[in-house]
Amino acid sequence: MNATESVPQGIQRLLIESRGRGLRAVAARERRAELTVGGAFVIAAVAIAVLVPTDRPLDWTDALLATFSLAVASLVIFEVGSVHSFPTQVAFVPMLFVLPPELVPLFVLAGLAAGKVTTAIVQQLAPGRVMMAAGDAWFSIGPSLLLAAAGAPAATEVGALLLLAALGSQFLVESIASGARERLHGHASVSEQAVESRWIYVVDTLLAPVGFAIALAATGRPWALLLSLPLFMLLLVFARERTARLQSLFELSSAYRGTAHVLGDMIEHDDTYTGTHSRSVVEHAVAVAAELGLDERRRRNVEFGALLHDVGKVAIPKALINKPGPLDEREWMLIRTHTVEGQRMLEKIGGLMSEIGLVVRSSHERYDGDGYPDGLAGEAIPIESRIIFACDAFNAMTTDRAYRSAMPVEDAVAELEANAGGQFDPDVVATLVRQVRERYRTPALV
Protein backbone atom coordinates (compact mmCIF):
# COMPACT_ATOMS: atom_id res chain seq x y z
CA MET A 1 0.00 0.00 0.00
CA ASN A 2 1.26 3.47 -0.87
CA ALA A 3 1.88 5.80 2.03
CA THR A 4 -0.53 8.31 0.61
CA GLU A 5 -3.32 5.73 0.54
CA SER A 6 -3.47 5.35 4.32
CA VAL A 7 -5.68 8.40 4.75
CA PRO A 8 -8.31 9.23 2.10
CA GLN A 9 -7.99 12.65 0.51
CA GLY A 10 -11.29 13.87 1.98
CA ILE A 11 -10.23 12.86 5.46
CA GLN A 12 -6.83 14.46 4.88
CA ARG A 13 -8.64 17.71 4.13
CA LEU A 14 -10.67 17.46 7.33
CA LEU A 15 -7.58 16.70 9.40
CA ILE A 16 -5.71 19.70 8.03
CA GLU A 17 -8.72 21.95 8.60
CA SER A 18 -9.16 20.59 12.13
CA ARG A 19 -5.51 21.25 13.00
CA GLY A 20 -5.77 24.87 12.00
CA ARG A 21 -9.17 25.30 13.63
CA GLY A 22 -7.98 24.40 17.13
CA LEU A 23 -5.79 27.48 17.44
CA ARG A 24 -8.30 29.87 15.86
CA ALA A 25 -10.74 31.92 17.88
CA VAL A 26 -14.26 30.50 17.89
CA ALA A 27 -16.22 31.88 14.93
CA ALA A 28 -19.80 33.04 15.28
CA ARG A 29 -21.21 29.96 13.53
CA GLU A 30 -19.12 27.63 15.68
CA ARG A 31 -20.20 29.45 18.83
CA ARG A 32 -23.87 29.09 17.92
CA ALA A 33 -23.39 25.40 17.11
CA GLU A 34 -21.55 24.68 20.36
CA LEU A 35 -24.04 26.63 22.46
CA THR A 36 -26.81 24.60 20.88
CA VAL A 37 -25.17 21.18 21.20
CA GLY A 38 -23.42 21.90 24.50
CA GLY A 39 -26.46 23.57 26.01
CA ALA A 40 -28.60 20.57 25.07
CA PHE A 41 -26.06 18.31 26.80
CA VAL A 42 -26.13 20.33 30.02
CA ILE A 43 -29.93 20.20 30.06
CA ALA A 44 -29.88 16.42 29.48
CA ALA A 45 -27.19 15.84 32.14
CA VAL A 46 -29.03 17.88 34.77
CA ALA A 47 -32.31 16.19 33.91
CA ILE A 48 -30.79 12.74 34.42
CA ALA A 49 -29.23 13.81 37.74
CA VAL A 50 -32.56 15.13 39.00
CA LEU A 51 -35.06 12.71 37.50
CA VAL A 52 -33.21 9.36 37.70
CA PRO A 53 -31.65 9.27 41.19
CA THR A 54 -29.99 6.12 42.54
CA ASP A 55 -29.01 4.92 46.01
CA ARG A 56 -25.27 4.95 45.33
CA PRO A 57 -23.64 7.61 47.53
CA LEU A 58 -21.19 10.15 46.12
CA ASP A 59 -17.67 9.79 47.47
CA TRP A 60 -15.69 12.91 46.60
CA THR A 61 -12.37 11.09 46.70
CA ASP A 62 -13.67 8.68 44.07
CA ALA A 63 -15.09 11.61 42.10
CA LEU A 64 -11.83 13.56 42.08
CA LEU A 65 -9.72 10.52 41.11
CA ALA A 66 -12.15 9.51 38.36
CA THR A 67 -12.37 13.05 37.00
CA PHE A 68 -8.59 13.42 37.07
CA SER A 69 -8.20 10.14 35.19
CA LEU A 70 -10.67 11.28 32.53
CA ALA A 71 -8.91 14.65 32.21
CA VAL A 72 -5.60 12.87 31.58
CA ALA A 73 -7.25 10.59 29.02
CA SER A 74 -8.59 13.63 27.15
CA LEU A 75 -5.02 14.87 26.66
CA VAL A 76 -4.19 11.80 24.56
CA ILE A 77 -5.44 12.94 21.16
CA PHE A 78 -5.73 10.71 18.10
CA GLU A 79 -6.61 12.75 15.00
CA VAL A 80 -9.55 11.40 12.98
CA GLY A 81 -10.88 13.73 10.30
CA SER A 82 -12.72 16.76 11.64
CA VAL A 83 -12.87 15.25 15.14
CA HIS A 84 -10.47 13.68 17.62
CA SER A 85 -10.53 10.33 19.36
CA PHE A 86 -9.49 9.99 22.99
CA PRO A 87 -8.98 6.82 25.11
CA THR A 88 -11.65 8.09 27.49
CA GLN A 89 -13.35 4.68 27.69
CA VAL A 90 -10.61 3.52 30.06
CA ALA A 91 -11.61 6.26 32.53
CA PHE A 92 -15.30 6.58 31.64
CA VAL A 93 -16.32 2.96 32.22
CA PRO A 94 -14.98 2.91 35.83
CA MET A 95 -16.87 6.16 36.46
CA LEU A 96 -20.14 4.38 35.72
CA PHE A 97 -19.53 1.87 38.51
CA VAL A 98 -17.74 4.02 41.10
CA LEU A 99 -19.82 7.20 40.97
CA PRO A 100 -23.61 7.57 41.03
CA PRO A 101 -24.35 6.97 37.35
CA GLU A 102 -26.86 9.83 37.21
CA LEU A 103 -24.02 12.24 38.05
CA VAL A 104 -21.46 10.76 35.64
CA PRO A 105 -22.26 13.11 32.69
CA LEU A 106 -21.56 16.14 34.88
CA PHE A 107 -18.22 14.72 36.04
CA VAL A 108 -17.38 13.76 32.45
CA LEU A 109 -17.99 17.39 31.50
CA ALA A 110 -15.71 18.50 34.35
CA GLY A 111 -12.94 16.12 33.25
CA LEU A 112 -13.11 17.12 29.58
CA ALA A 113 -13.18 20.80 30.48
CA ALA A 114 -10.12 20.34 32.72
CA GLY A 115 -8.30 18.65 29.84
CA LYS A 116 -9.14 21.48 27.43
CA VAL A 117 -8.07 24.11 29.97
CA THR A 118 -4.72 22.33 30.31
CA THR A 119 -4.33 22.23 26.52
CA ALA A 120 -5.17 25.93 26.29
CA ILE A 121 -2.63 26.76 29.00
CA VAL A 122 0.17 25.15 26.96
CA GLN A 123 -1.11 27.16 23.97
CA GLN A 124 -2.22 24.20 21.86
CA LEU A 125 -5.87 25.28 21.93
CA ALA A 126 -7.60 28.64 21.65
CA PRO A 127 -9.08 29.48 25.10
CA GLY A 128 -12.54 30.00 23.67
CA ARG A 129 -12.65 26.37 22.54
CA VAL A 130 -12.85 25.14 26.13
CA MET A 131 -16.61 25.64 25.72
CA MET A 132 -16.65 22.68 23.32
CA ALA A 133 -16.19 20.26 26.23
CA ALA A 134 -19.96 20.07 26.67
CA GLY A 135 -20.49 18.99 23.07
CA ASP A 136 -17.74 16.38 23.46
CA ALA A 137 -19.44 14.87 26.53
CA TRP A 138 -22.56 13.54 24.79
CA PHE A 139 -21.10 10.01 24.69
CA SER A 140 -21.74 9.72 28.45
CA ILE A 141 -25.51 10.26 28.32
CA GLY A 142 -26.67 6.87 27.04
CA PRO A 143 -24.71 4.56 29.38
CA SER A 144 -25.31 6.81 32.41
CA LEU A 145 -29.06 6.87 31.83
CA LEU A 146 -29.15 3.11 31.23
CA LEU A 147 -27.20 2.22 34.38
CA ALA A 148 -29.13 4.72 36.46
CA ALA A 149 -32.38 3.18 35.24
CA ALA A 150 -30.96 -0.26 36.12
CA GLY A 151 -30.44 0.86 39.74
CA ALA A 152 -26.69 1.54 39.66
CA PRO A 153 -25.44 -2.06 39.80
CA ALA A 154 -21.87 -2.67 40.97
CA ALA A 155 -19.28 -3.81 38.44
CA THR A 156 -19.30 -7.30 39.99
CA GLU A 157 -23.08 -7.54 39.43
CA VAL A 158 -23.18 -6.54 35.77
CA GLY A 159 -23.73 -9.05 32.99
CA ALA A 160 -22.46 -9.00 29.44
CA LEU A 161 -25.85 -8.00 28.00
CA LEU A 162 -26.04 -4.86 30.13
CA LEU A 163 -22.48 -3.92 29.17
CA LEU A 164 -23.24 -4.38 25.47
CA ALA A 165 -26.45 -2.39 25.85
CA ALA A 166 -24.53 0.42 27.55
CA LEU A 167 -21.95 0.48 24.75
CA GLY A 168 -24.68 0.45 22.12
CA SER A 169 -26.49 3.33 23.82
CA GLN A 170 -23.22 5.27 23.91
CA PHE A 171 -22.70 4.88 20.16
CA LEU A 172 -26.33 5.68 19.36
CA VAL A 173 -26.50 8.91 21.35
CA GLU A 174 -23.02 9.97 20.31
CA SER A 175 -23.70 9.40 16.61
CA ILE A 176 -26.89 11.48 16.78
CA ALA A 177 -25.16 14.29 18.66
CA SER A 178 -22.09 14.21 16.39
CA GLY A 179 -24.24 14.24 13.27
CA ALA A 180 -26.17 17.26 14.52
CA ARG A 181 -22.96 18.98 15.55
CA GLU A 182 -21.26 18.44 12.18
CA ARG A 183 -24.37 19.62 10.35
CA LEU A 184 -24.42 22.82 12.41
CA HIS A 185 -20.69 23.34 11.87
CA GLY A 186 -20.81 22.36 8.19
CA HIS A 187 -17.52 20.46 8.41
CA ALA A 188 -17.89 16.80 7.40
CA SER A 189 -20.24 15.11 4.95
CA VAL A 190 -22.26 12.07 6.00
CA SER A 191 -19.83 9.70 4.26
CA GLU A 192 -16.84 11.36 5.91
CA GLN A 193 -18.57 11.17 9.29
CA ALA A 194 -19.04 7.44 8.72
CA VAL A 195 -15.29 6.99 8.14
CA GLU A 196 -14.50 8.99 11.26
CA SER A 197 -17.09 7.19 13.41
CA ARG A 198 -15.90 3.74 12.33
CA TRP A 199 -12.43 4.42 13.72
CA ILE A 200 -13.74 5.99 16.93
CA TYR A 201 -16.22 3.21 17.66
CA VAL A 202 -13.67 0.49 17.04
CA VAL A 203 -11.26 2.15 19.47
CA ASP A 204 -14.00 2.62 22.09
CA THR A 205 -15.11 -0.99 21.76
CA LEU A 206 -11.57 -2.30 22.22
CA LEU A 207 -10.87 -0.05 25.23
CA ALA A 208 -14.19 -0.66 27.01
CA PRO A 209 -13.10 -4.06 28.47
CA VAL A 210 -9.93 -2.41 29.80
CA GLY A 211 -12.07 0.22 31.50
CA PHE A 212 -14.33 -2.48 32.96
CA ALA A 213 -11.31 -4.35 34.35
CA ILE A 214 -10.25 -1.16 36.14
CA ALA A 215 -13.82 -0.76 37.40
CA LEU A 216 -13.62 -4.25 38.93
CA ALA A 217 -10.26 -3.43 40.50
CA ALA A 218 -11.59 -0.11 41.86
CA THR A 219 -14.47 -1.75 43.74
CA GLY A 220 -13.62 -0.80 47.34
CA ARG A 221 -10.18 0.46 46.23
CA PRO A 222 -10.49 4.02 44.80
CA TRP A 223 -6.73 4.29 44.18
CA ALA A 224 -7.14 1.61 41.49
CA LEU A 225 -8.66 4.31 39.29
CA LEU A 226 -5.11 5.56 38.79
CA LEU A 227 -4.03 2.25 37.22
CA SER A 228 -5.02 3.73 33.89
CA LEU A 229 -2.34 6.43 33.99
CA PRO A 230 0.58 4.26 32.70
CA LEU A 231 -1.65 3.16 29.82
CA PHE A 232 -2.42 6.78 28.98
CA MET A 233 1.28 7.60 28.92
CA LEU A 234 1.88 4.74 26.48
CA LEU A 235 -1.03 5.80 24.29
CA LEU A 236 0.27 9.36 24.31
CA VAL A 237 3.48 8.10 22.69
CA PHE A 238 1.44 6.31 20.02
CA ALA A 239 -0.75 9.39 19.46
CA ARG A 240 2.26 11.61 18.92
CA GLU A 241 3.77 9.08 16.52
CA ARG A 242 0.49 9.01 14.58
CA THR A 243 0.44 12.80 14.40
CA ALA A 244 3.99 12.87 13.10
CA ARG A 245 3.22 10.14 10.55
CA LEU A 246 0.12 11.98 9.32
CA GLN A 247 2.14 15.15 8.92
CA SER A 248 4.64 13.24 6.79
CA LEU A 249 1.80 11.79 4.71
CA PHE A 250 0.33 15.23 4.10
CA GLU A 251 3.69 16.61 3.05
CA LEU A 252 4.31 13.64 0.75
CA SER A 253 0.84 13.89 -0.78
CA SER A 254 1.35 17.60 -1.37
CA ALA A 255 4.73 16.90 -2.94
CA TYR A 256 3.25 14.33 -5.34
CA ARG A 257 0.46 16.69 -6.36
CA GLY A 258 2.94 19.50 -6.82
CA THR A 259 5.15 17.25 -8.93
CA ALA A 260 2.22 16.29 -11.14
CA HIS A 261 1.32 19.92 -11.75
CA VAL A 262 4.93 20.92 -12.41
CA LEU A 263 5.13 18.17 -15.01
CA GLY A 264 1.83 19.36 -16.43
CA ASP A 265 3.22 22.87 -16.71
CA MET A 266 6.33 21.47 -18.37
CA ILE A 267 4.19 19.69 -20.97
CA GLU A 268 2.25 22.88 -21.68
CA HIS A 269 5.43 24.92 -21.97
CA ASP A 270 6.93 22.36 -24.34
CA ASP A 271 3.77 22.12 -26.45
CA THR A 272 0.78 24.36 -25.75
CA TYR A 273 -1.74 22.07 -27.46
CA THR A 274 -0.61 18.96 -25.59
CA GLY A 275 -0.66 20.77 -22.23
CA THR A 276 -4.07 22.36 -22.75
CA HIS A 277 -5.42 19.08 -24.12
CA SER A 278 -4.21 17.16 -21.04
CA ARG A 279 -5.90 19.58 -18.65
CA SER A 280 -9.15 19.29 -20.62
CA VAL A 281 -8.97 15.50 -20.46
CA VAL A 282 -8.62 15.72 -16.66
CA GLU A 283 -11.98 17.45 -16.33
CA HIS A 284 -13.88 14.77 -18.24
CA ALA A 285 -11.93 11.85 -16.78
CA VAL A 286 -12.38 12.88 -13.14
CA ALA A 287 -16.13 13.30 -13.66
CA VAL A 288 -16.43 9.88 -15.34
CA ALA A 289 -14.42 8.21 -12.56
CA ALA A 290 -16.68 9.74 -9.92
CA GLU A 291 -19.87 8.63 -11.69
CA LEU A 292 -18.50 5.10 -12.11
CA GLY A 293 -17.99 4.95 -8.33
CA LEU A 294 -14.22 4.49 -8.30
CA ASP A 295 -12.64 4.67 -4.87
CA GLU A 296 -10.55 7.64 -3.84
CA ARG A 297 -7.22 6.05 -4.78
CA ARG A 298 -8.37 5.25 -8.30
CA ARG A 299 -9.95 8.70 -8.73
CA ARG A 300 -6.62 10.20 -7.75
CA ASN A 301 -4.88 7.95 -10.31
CA VAL A 302 -7.33 9.10 -12.97
CA GLU A 303 -6.67 12.75 -12.17
CA PHE A 304 -2.89 12.45 -12.23
CA GLY A 305 -2.89 9.98 -15.12
CA ALA A 306 -5.08 12.25 -17.26
CA LEU A 307 -2.85 15.22 -16.49
CA LEU A 308 0.32 13.28 -17.34
CA HIS A 309 -0.84 10.81 -20.01
CA ASP A 310 1.10 12.72 -22.68
CA VAL A 311 4.17 13.53 -20.57
CA GLY A 312 6.27 11.15 -22.67
CA LYS A 313 5.74 13.35 -25.71
CA VAL A 314 8.40 15.74 -24.42
CA ALA A 315 10.87 13.13 -25.69
CA ILE A 316 9.31 13.16 -29.19
CA PRO A 317 10.56 15.77 -31.70
CA LYS A 318 8.17 18.74 -31.90
CA ALA A 319 8.25 18.62 -35.69
CA LEU A 320 6.75 15.16 -35.54
CA ILE A 321 4.15 16.08 -32.89
CA ASN A 322 2.97 19.06 -34.94
CA LYS A 323 3.34 17.50 -38.41
CA PRO A 324 0.44 18.86 -40.54
CA GLY A 325 0.05 15.78 -42.70
CA PRO A 326 -0.38 12.04 -42.03
CA LEU A 327 2.42 10.12 -40.33
CA ASP A 328 4.24 7.25 -42.00
CA GLU A 329 4.75 3.90 -40.29
CA ARG A 330 8.18 4.79 -38.89
CA GLU A 331 6.82 8.05 -37.45
CA TRP A 332 3.85 6.25 -35.89
CA MET A 333 6.20 3.77 -34.24
CA LEU A 334 8.10 6.67 -32.70
CA ILE A 335 4.90 8.42 -31.53
CA ARG A 336 3.72 5.21 -29.92
CA THR A 337 6.76 5.14 -27.67
CA HIS A 338 5.45 8.14 -25.72
CA THR A 339 3.42 6.02 -23.26
CA VAL A 340 6.44 3.86 -22.40
CA GLU A 341 8.61 6.97 -22.22
CA GLY A 342 6.05 8.58 -19.92
CA GLN A 343 6.09 5.57 -17.62
CA ARG A 344 9.88 5.60 -17.56
CA MET A 345 9.94 9.27 -16.56
CA LEU A 346 7.40 8.78 -13.78
CA GLU A 347 9.13 5.68 -12.43
CA LYS A 348 12.26 7.76 -11.96
CA ILE A 349 10.30 9.93 -9.53
CA GLY A 350 9.14 6.80 -7.71
CA GLY A 351 6.47 6.28 -5.06
CA LEU A 352 2.99 7.25 -6.17
CA MET A 353 4.28 8.36 -9.56
CA SER A 354 5.34 4.79 -10.32
CA GLU A 355 1.68 3.78 -9.98
CA ILE A 356 0.61 6.67 -12.19
CA GLY A 357 3.23 5.50 -14.68
CA LEU A 358 1.36 2.20 -15.11
CA VAL A 359 -1.82 4.15 -15.90
CA VAL A 360 0.04 6.31 -18.41
CA ARG A 361 1.62 3.26 -20.08
CA SER A 362 -1.81 1.73 -20.73
CA SER A 363 -3.58 4.96 -21.72
CA HIS A 364 -3.62 3.95 -25.42
CA GLU A 365 -4.63 0.31 -25.00
CA ARG A 366 -7.84 -0.57 -26.87
CA TYR A 367 -10.66 -2.55 -25.29
CA ASP A 368 -10.44 -5.11 -28.14
CA GLY A 369 -6.69 -5.62 -27.65
CA ASP A 370 -5.45 -3.74 -30.73
CA GLY A 371 -3.89 -0.87 -28.81
CA TYR A 372 -0.32 -0.23 -27.68
CA PRO A 373 2.24 -0.81 -26.22
CA ASP A 374 1.27 -4.18 -24.70
CA GLY A 375 -1.88 -5.22 -26.57
CA LEU A 376 -3.93 -5.50 -23.37
CA ALA A 377 -7.67 -6.08 -23.73
CA GLY A 378 -10.85 -5.66 -21.68
CA GLU A 379 -10.54 -5.82 -17.91
CA ALA A 380 -6.78 -6.39 -18.19
CA ILE A 381 -6.45 -2.68 -18.95
CA PRO A 382 -6.52 -0.58 -15.76
CA ILE A 383 -9.90 1.12 -15.41
CA GLU A 384 -8.10 4.43 -14.97
CA SER A 385 -6.45 3.98 -18.38
CA ARG A 386 -9.74 3.01 -20.02
CA ILE A 387 -11.35 6.19 -18.74
CA ILE A 388 -8.45 8.38 -19.85
CA PHE A 389 -8.36 6.75 -23.31
CA ALA A 390 -12.02 7.52 -24.04
CA CYS A 391 -11.83 11.07 -22.65
CA ASP A 392 -8.59 11.66 -24.54
CA ALA A 393 -10.22 10.55 -27.80
CA PHE A 394 -13.29 12.74 -27.27
CA ASN A 395 -11.19 15.79 -26.50
CA ALA A 396 -8.91 15.15 -29.48
CA MET A 397 -11.91 14.85 -31.81
CA THR A 398 -13.49 18.08 -30.61
CA THR A 399 -10.39 20.32 -30.76
CA ASP A 400 -8.49 21.72 -33.72
CA ARG A 401 -5.32 19.85 -34.66
CA ALA A 402 -2.46 20.77 -36.98
CA TYR A 403 -3.79 18.38 -39.63
CA ARG A 404 -7.59 18.82 -39.25
CA SER A 405 -10.35 20.95 -37.80
CA ALA A 406 -12.39 20.08 -34.71
CA MET A 407 -15.25 17.63 -35.15
CA PRO A 408 -18.78 18.69 -34.03
CA VAL A 409 -19.71 17.34 -30.60
CA GLU A 410 -22.59 15.28 -32.03
CA ASP A 411 -20.23 13.56 -34.46
CA ALA A 412 -17.68 12.87 -31.72
CA VAL A 413 -20.43 11.32 -29.55
CA ALA A 414 -21.51 9.14 -32.49
CA GLU A 415 -17.89 8.07 -33.00
CA LEU A 416 -17.54 7.08 -29.34
CA GLU A 417 -20.74 5.05 -29.42
CA ALA A 418 -19.81 3.37 -32.71
CA ASN A 419 -16.53 2.18 -31.18
CA ALA A 420 -17.86 1.16 -27.76
CA GLY A 421 -16.85 -2.45 -27.11
CA GLY A 422 -14.16 -2.26 -29.77
CA GLN A 423 -11.85 0.65 -29.22
CA PHE A 424 -13.40 1.80 -25.94
CA ASP A 425 -14.84 0.30 -22.75
CA PRO A 426 -18.63 0.42 -23.30
CA ASP A 427 -19.38 1.39 -19.68
CA VAL A 428 -16.92 4.26 -19.86
CA VAL A 429 -18.40 5.42 -23.17
CA ALA A 430 -21.96 5.31 -21.81
CA THR A 431 -20.94 7.39 -18.79
CA LEU A 432 -18.91 9.87 -20.82
CA VAL A 433 -21.68 10.29 -23.41
CA ARG A 434 -24.24 11.00 -20.65
CA GLN A 435 -22.00 13.69 -19.24
CA VAL A 436 -21.26 15.19 -22.65
CA ARG A 437 -24.93 15.38 -23.57
CA GLU A 438 -25.76 16.98 -20.25
CA ARG A 439 -22.93 19.48 -20.56
CA TYR A 440 -23.48 20.39 -24.17
CA ARG A 441 -27.23 19.78 -24.16
CA THR A 442 -26.73 17.43 -27.10
CA PRO A 443 -29.85 15.34 -27.82
CA ALA A 444 -29.53 11.57 -27.91
CA LEU A 445 -28.73 10.36 -31.38
CA VAL A 446 -31.04 7.78 -32.96
Image (cartoon, grey):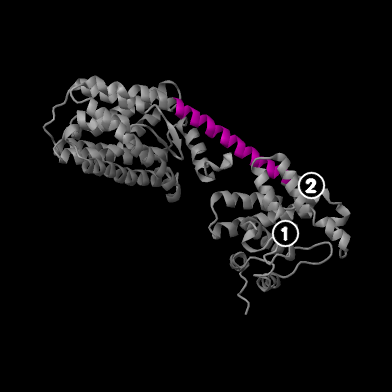
Q: Is residue 283 left or right of residue 97?
A: right
Task: Please provide percent x and percent y for residue 36.
Answer: 32, 41
Label 2 or label 1, whichever lies nearer to me, is: 1
Q: Quadrant of residue 197?
A: top left
Task: Determine the residue positioned at 84% across, 56% down.
Answer: 334
Between 368 and 26, the one lying in front of the other is: 368
Between 421 and 412, the one lying in front of the other is: 421
Q: Earlier in the sequence, mark 2 or mark 1?
A: 2
**Residue 269 got which mark?**
2
Q: Main secondary structure of the magenta part?
A: helix
Q: CA distance from mark 2 to mark 1?
A: 23 Å
- The kind of secondary structure element at disc 2 is helix
**Residue 364 got which mark?**
1
Identity of the amino acid at label 1? His
Task: Please provide percent x and percent y for residue 425.
Answer: 63, 65
Identity of the amino acid at label 2? His
- Part of the protein shown in magenta: 237-263
Task: Please provide percent x and percent y for residue 259.
Answer: 69, 41
